[in-house]
Image (cartoon, grey):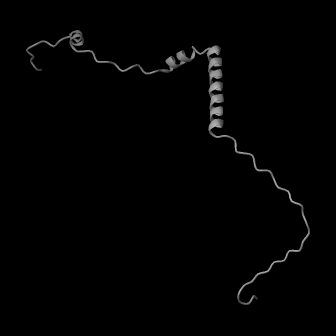
Amino acid sequence: MVDTPHPLPSDRALRTALPRVAQAPPRLGLGRIRGAASGLTWRRGLLGGVALLVVGFAAVKGYERVRPAPAAAPALQTVAVARRSIVESVALPGTAT
């Protein structure tokens, strides 16, 4: 045993003497998540769905504005067909075998 000149302070005295330390925010437990989801009503769901549709429509229209549809292909030309003989000639130096 060790002799101490002063008596040890009690737990209560230590708690009041020490400065308070900031505590970390509580973690979200499963109960808190369920509690937050229980506030979701059908009106909020409908409003969220409408907002999602509006944002999606705006995104599609914005994409179409940035990337317009490709231009139409030029019109085809038609020509009358005539029967003719095809003659090909090749001129090469040397002999052909």
Q: Residue furthest right?
A: 83
Outermost bottom residue: 95
Q: Quadrant of residue 26?
A: top left
Is residue 73 left or right of 26 when viewed as pictured?
A: right
Q: Position of residue 77 (x, y in %)?
A: 82, 55
Q: Residue at x 50, y 17 (%)?
A: 32
Q: Whole-percent x and y of residue 55?
A: 62, 27
Camera-side residue: 9 or 23? 23
Label count reads 0
**Horizontal relation, residue 1 to residue 38: left or right:** left
The residue shown at (13%, 12%) is 7
Seen in the picture, residue 93 relative to 33 is either above or below; the reply is below
Residue 13 x, y percent position in the rendering: 21, 10
Left/right of residue 77 with respect to residue 20 in the rendered view: right
Please name whichever residue, 15 or 60, is drawn nearer the observer in this view of the structure.
Answer: 60
Toward the viewer: 60 or 2? 60
Q: Residue at x 65, y 18 (%)?
A: 46
**Residue 81 or residue 6, whichever sits in front:** 81
Image quarter of residue 17: top left
Q: Quadrant of the C terminus?
A: bottom right
Name the residue rendered at 63%, 18% in the picture.
Answer: 47
91 vs 38: above or below: below
Spot occupied by residue 67 in the image (x, y as percentages of width and height): 64, 40
* The N terminus: image quadrant: top left
